[in-house]
Amino acid sequence: MAFLRRLGWYLVGLSIGIVFLVFFLKKKSGENGIEFCYFPNCRVLKDMRSKPIVFSEEFNQEKDTLLIKSFLNDGDIDFGNSNTKSEPCKTYLINHAIKNKELVLNAQNCTDKIVILSLKEN
């Protein structure tokens, strides 16, 4: 009888855990679900995505915001060549390969906006 009681409590706990796990994974996989950013690249890009984009006056190329957003979603930040100590805005070089071309975006991450400085082919 003791074994059946322990098995019952085990199954109750297991079912509660499965319900929480299904709820949590459903939120994570949704369109606006939970996103985990543990690495510096992901944290900086997530912070940049949350701010409005402003183009600098020196930026003389076509202002394609979808291209810029693709950098902020799938880009790789070159921390070695970026100036992360500059004040008041940190300057980042973001690499991204699009249609077999390696592009580099130079952007400043300010407290209230993102300033796009240049877009070059590498």
Image (cartoon, helix red, strand yellow):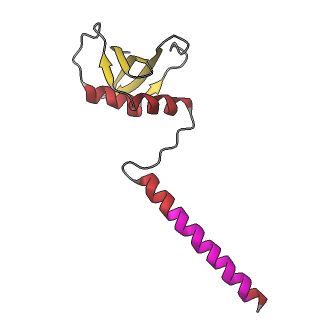
Residue 97 among those drawn in magenta: no
Question: Which residue is outermost to the top?
Answer: 58
> Can you say whether 65 is above or below 87 in the image?
below
> Can you say whether 18 is above or below 44 in the image?
below
Question: Which residue is outermost to the front?
Answer: 112
Question: Which residue is outermost to the right?
Answer: 2
Question: Which residue is outermost to the bottom?
Answer: 1
Residue under the image location 40 percent in, 32 percent down = 50
Q: Position of residue 67 (x, y in %)?
A: 29, 27
Q: Does the magenta stretch mainly form a helix, a strand or a loop? A: helix
67 or 122, which lies in front? Answer: 67
Q: Position of residue 91 (x, y in %)?
A: 46, 14
Residue under the image location 58 percent in, 71 percent down = 16
> Can you say whether 5 is above or below 102 in the image?
below
Q: Position of residue 24 (x, y in %)?
A: 50, 58
Residue under the image location 76 percent in, 92 percent down = 1
User: Across the whole image, how many numbered discs are drawn on residues?
Assistant: 0
In this picture, residue 62 sits left or right of residue 119: left
Residue 8 among those drawn in magenta: yes
Start-end of magenta stretch:
4-22
Q: Position of residue 96 (x, y in %)?
A: 39, 26
In this picture, residue 69 sits left or right of residue 15: left
> Can you say whether 30 is above or below 65 in the image?
below
Residue under the image location 44 percent in, 55 percent down = 27
The quarter of the image holding the C terminus is: top left
